[in-house]
Image: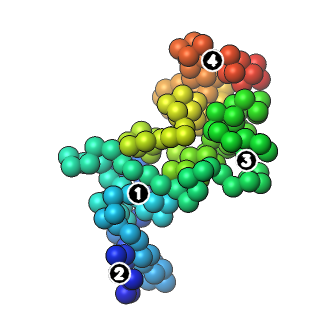
Amino acid sequence: MACCEGLVARCAKKTGDTTCNDERDPEQQPMCLACGDGVCSTLEQRCNCPEDCAVGEKRRKIRYRGSNPEGPRQGDPNVPQGATRPDQCLEFLGDADRVHNCLRAWTWAVLGRNSWDELQDADSISPLTPFDLKLMRCLSLAQGGRRPRSGPNRESCLQALSQSTKDARLDKLLRR
């Protein structure tokens, strides 16, 4: 497959947290990506574009870029009407799952990622804050009785975040 100048054909994909699969379905075509430009864009990830998306000795942090640096597009069903900043997810919404979906919409639009763990290696998470990522992490955990194999559940994580930050906005998520 020939790509335009400045682009490279890649097809590897992530198969888990730490592994990559270089093999591809014979029906699937490689994608032309701008690997090597120093930015890990929406379609790029550490398996198909390690020069931009993998942390190593030469690259300690990753510069992520989503498709809309201003935030989710107007009318996004996961973002409350009138929200212009990610912290407004928690201000405007009272349901933990809706807050989580709203924060994921922000991280996807701005950074091209919707998982808090990928963003731990980000050069910048602006306009999100470290608090937003911690909240996103808590909200991604299983609830109450559906306890994960190890570690905290959603409620205990939110309680710890509330105690460490003294952010009263978290109270509405803890009352449910």
Would you name the residue on which mark 4 appears?
167
Indicate which disc, 1 or 2, sits on the residue closer to the N terminus: 2
Which of the two discs, 1 and 2, sits closer to the camera? 2
The three-letter code of the residue at mark 2 reads: Glu
The three-letter code of the residue at mark 1 reads: Cys
Which of the two discs, 3 and 2, sits closer to the camera? 2
Indicate which disc, 2 or 4, sits on the residue closer to the N terminus: 2
Report, in whole angstroms, how far the alpha carbon at label 3 lies from the one at label 2. Answer: 37 Å
Can the viewer see residue 159? no
Would you name the residue on which mark 1 appears?
40
Q: Secondary structure at mark 4?
A: loop
Indicate which disc, 4 or 1, sits on the residue closer to the N terminus: 1
Would you name the residue on which mark 3 appears?
78
- Screen quadrant of the N terminus: bottom left
Indicate which disc, 3 or 4, sits on the residue closer to the N terminus: 3
Can the viewer see residue 133? yes
Indicate which disc, 3 or 2, sits on the residue closer to the N terminus: 2
The three-letter code of the residue at mark 3 reads: Asn
Could you say which quadrant of the image residue 48 lies in?
Answer: bottom left
CA neighbours of label 2 inside 10 A, class few (<14), some (14 to 19), many (20+): few
- Asked whether 82 or 1 is in front, the reply is 82
Q: Residue at x 49, y 83 (%)?
A: 27
Report, in whole angstroms, how far the alpha carbon at label 2 lies from the one at label 4. Answer: 50 Å
Q: Is residue 117 left or right of residue 21?
A: right
Instruction: Identify whether 172 is placed above or below 60.
Output: above
The three-letter code of the residue at mark 4 reads: Asp
Report, in whole angstroms, how far the alpha carbon at label 1 lies from the one at label 2. Answer: 18 Å
CA neighbours of label 4 inside 10 A, class few (<14), some (14 to 19), many (20+): few
Q: Residue at x 55, y 40 (%)?
A: 127
Could you say which quadrant of the image residue 161 lies in?
Answer: top right
Q: Are marks 3 and 2 in contact (CB under 8 Å)?
A: no
Q: Secondary structure at mark 3?
A: loop
